[in-house]
Amino acid sequence: MKSIKVTDIGQLKNELNKYRKGKKLEIRQFNQAARLAWLGKVTMMPLEPEDPESESYLVYVDFPEGLSAQLLNIDEDLVGRILVLDGEQGRYLAEIIEQGVHERAALYRDLDKRDFYFGKFYKPTDTQGGTGG
């Protein structure tokens, strides 16, 4: 059986603490992740839910689908992976997810109330007595 000798416990602890704090995405990648978060393509959870000192998040960024896959420029190394994200950017992504849910729900509510037929065939007359164009 092989064993791994640990000669510098302090270095090992530093590496573990660095991992637990998570990392920040570059601005470009954060914006890409935020776009996908708004679309509902990001799943996240606290890295260590039982540790009150841990602020970082496990974040899975899913692949865009359909029209969004055609129109959004997303780095291939960002999607389909689980990231350990620092607490600050994780909280911002959570806010963006919530904002996206509310805004998409409002779009669907408005769409459900919209009357396409009436808007296309009703031509109101102007107040001068002529017909609208």
Image (cartoon, rainbow, N blue to C red):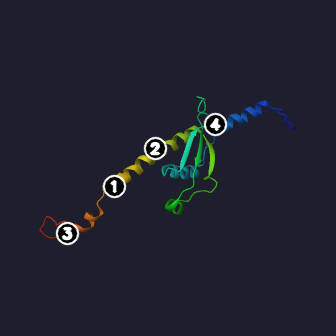
> Could you tell me which quadrant the C terminus lies in?
bottom left
- Local packing at callout 4 (Cα closer than 10 Å; few below 14, some 14-19, many 20+) is some
Residue with the mark numbered 1 = 112
Task: Report the label total.
Answer: 4
Residue with the mark numbered 3 = 132
Disc 4 residue type (three-letter): Lys
Q: Residue at x 14, y 70 (%)?
A: 130
Residue with the mark numbered 2 = 98
Residue with the mark numbered 4 = 21
Q: Residue at x 55, y 50 (%)?
A: 33
Asked if disc 4 and disc 3 are in contact, CB closer than 8 Å, the reply is no
Front-most of residues 109 and 18: 109
Question: How far apart are the two marked residues, 2 and 1, measured between alpha carbons?
Answer: 21 Å
Does residue 75 sit above or below 13 in this rendering?
below
Disc 3 residue type (three-letter): Gly
Of the two numbered discs 2 and 1 on the same chain, state the one appearing first in sequence: 2
- Extreme residue toward the left, this view: 129
Depth-wise, is mark 2 or mark 4 nearer the camera? 2
Question: How far apart are the two marked residues, 2 and 4, measured between alpha carbons?
Answer: 23 Å
From the top left corner, tell me how far across and down residue 17 is, in percent: 68, 34
Depth-wise, is mark 2 or mark 3 nearer the camera? 2
Please give left or right for residue 78 compared with residue 105 in the image: right
Depth-wise, is mark 3 or mark 1 nearer the camera? 1
Disc 2 residue type (three-letter): Glu
Q: Which structural element holds mark 3?
A: loop
Q: Quadrant of residue 47?
A: top right
